[in-house]
């Protein structure tokens, strides 16, 4: 994701210019131009994520798997140690 940031910034500047030019040609309001920019920017960023196969959710997937696993293992080890102390 970090490697895509310069490319996204460059594409955002170019898209901002294109939307402003097109908005002046067609007489769009500021709200309409902002809406077109946001929609097109979202599409461009999604295409970049697909191209480079680096969706932001993939970065958090490891966290979503490791934290519950760590909690379960730590509870299991705690229960094992409590059982060992009680039987002695």
Image (cartoon, helix red, strand yellow):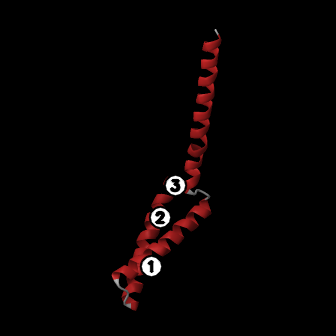
Q: Would you name the residue on which mark 3 appears?
A: 1
Separation (CA) of disc 1 from disc 2: 17 Å
Residue at disc 2, secondary structure: helix
Please state the horizontal and vertical placement of residue 11, each as a whole percent of the image.
46, 69
How many neighbours does mark 2 have within 10 angstroms: few (below 14), some (14-19), or many (20 or more)? some
Please state the horizontal and vertical placement of residue 68, each as a whole percent of the image.
59, 39
Left or right relative to 27: residue 52: right
Depth check: 11 or 64 in front?
64
Marker disc for residue 36: 1
Depth check: 17 or 50 in front?
50
Please state the horizontal and vertical placement of residue 70, each as a whole percent of the image.
59, 34
Left or right relative to 6: residue 80: right
Please state the horizontal and vertical placement of residue 86, each as a whole percent of the image.
61, 14
Separation (CA) of disc 1 from disc 3: 24 Å
Q: Would you name the residue on which mark 2 appears?
A: 8
Against 1, residue 35 (above or below) is below
Separation (CA) of disc 2 from disc 3: 10 Å
């Amino acid at each position: 994701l970090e490697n895509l940031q310069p490319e996204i910034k460059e594409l955002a500047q170019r898209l901002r210019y294109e939307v402003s030019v097109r908005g002046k040609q067609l007489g769009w309001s500021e709200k309409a131009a902002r809406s077109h920019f946001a929609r097109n920017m979202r599409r461009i960023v999604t295409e970049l994520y697909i191209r480079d196969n680096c969706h932001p959710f993939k970065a958090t997937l490891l966290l979503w798997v490791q934290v519950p696993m760590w909690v379960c293992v730590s509870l299991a080890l705690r229960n094992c140690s409590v059982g060992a102390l009680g039987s002695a």
